[in-house]
Image (cartoon, helix red, strand yellow):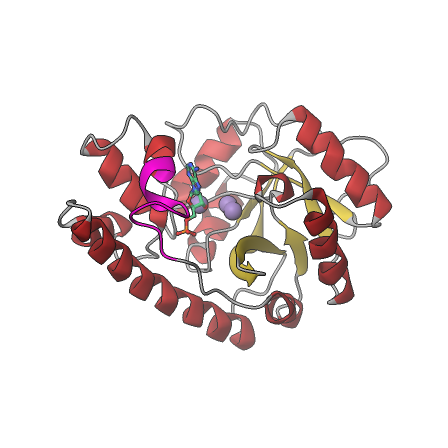
Amino acid sequence: MNLRYDLHTHSTASDGTLTPPELVDFAHQQGVDVLALTDHDVTKGLAEATQAASLQSMTLISGVEISVSWRHQTIHILGLNIDAEDTSLLTGLEKLRAFRVWRAEEIGRRLEKAGIGGAFEVALTMSNGKNISRTHFARFLAQAGYARDVRQVFKRYLVRGKPGYVPGQWAELAEVIGWIHAAGGIAVIAHPARYKISATRLRELIEQFKKEGGQAIEVVSGTHSRDECERIAQLARHYDLLASRGSDFHDPAVAYIKMASLADLPENLTPVWVGW
Ligand code: AMP
Ligand code: MN
Ligand code: MN
Ligand code: MN
């Protein structure tokens, strides 16, 4: 049987809008057979998601999307098929979440200076005590009419050079791969075509990732165009990396990232799930 895999999704445990059980039900309706929940820097939604999946005869893969600082850039590394209780992983993620809280306060202070008051408090409430992210600020600013939608808010307020931007101080690439391996998982470079880096730098990232023991790359992503997908497929073949497939789903109201219409993996690639 040909199973449908979606190995990159978010819930309310980080910046998604569906609770873990709602996400599982949604994925089931969309025809997903094997789902990975990969919240940002947190594994707290996994137990609930696993339980919900067992009621749907779906397979839930425990995952996480970890924030990395690499040459002053933020890079995301997915850990797939992890032991969500592993101590070194949990300790590492806790450090990242502590930075998130400090950064959110700092974003609030900077927006305040730009004339937008109270943003931290609202973003904190929107994150519901889970794991605060820029997405929570973006949703608030969009609702308050500071821009047309969340995408525009990012462009105007939250990216480098804009009033609410605070540089990331995340974990090192090698240490993150170490946490994922300690937890028995596979490290995957998430949405590689999204980074604002040259082709040469992307190759350097992949080379360092491989040297540190990284094994896989996300070829099919809800955030990749067809051309980007083909370009990353070529890199996966060239560097002999396992290929992953994930929507990066956050919110059913965001029309441009669809679970059901995600493309299949291109030919001549070894899927990341080959050994599962
Ligand atoms: P953070 O990890 O808190 O810095 O937030 C990053 C998250 O913001 C990503 O995982 C996306 O969900 C979201 N995001 C980043 N850039 C954009 C963008 N240009 N438009 C919409 N969402 C974005
Ligand atoms: Mn996100
Ligand atoms: Mn990401
Ligand atoms: Mn993601």
Q: Which image quadrant for residue 264?
A: top right
Q: Which image quadrant for residue 228?
A: top right
67 left or right, relative to 138:
right
84 left or right, relative to 134:
right
The segment highlighted magenta reads 154-166
**89, above or below 47, in the image:** below
Q: Ligand 1 shows up in which quadrant of the image?
A: top left
Magenta stretch, main secondary structure, is: loop
> Is residue 52 in view?
yes
Name the residue at 42% across, 54% down.
Answer: 45
Quadrant (top left, top right, bottom left, bottom right) of the N terminus = top right
Asked whether 156 falls inside the magenta stretch, the response is: yes
Q: Position of residue 28 (x, y in %)?
A: 52, 32
Asked whether 79 falls inside the magenta stretch, the response is: no
Q: Closest to the observer: 6 or 15?
A: 15
**180, above or below 156, in the image:** below
71 left or right, relative to 121:
right
Q: Closest to the observer: 127 or 191?
A: 191
Q: Position of residue 53 (x, y in %)?
A: 51, 44
Hey, which residue is sitting farthest front in the picture? 161
Q: What is the number of callouts on the image?
A: 0
Q: Position of residue 110 (x, y in %)?
A: 24, 54
21 left or right, relative to 206:
left
Q: Closest to the observer: 155 or 256?
A: 155
> Is residue 2 in view?
no
Name the residue at 52% across, 76% down.
Answer: 87
Name the residue at 43% across, 72% down.
Answer: 95
Q: Position of residue 92 (x, y in %)?
A: 50, 72
Q: Which image quadrant for residue 23?
A: top left
Q: Closest to the observer: 14 or 190?
A: 190
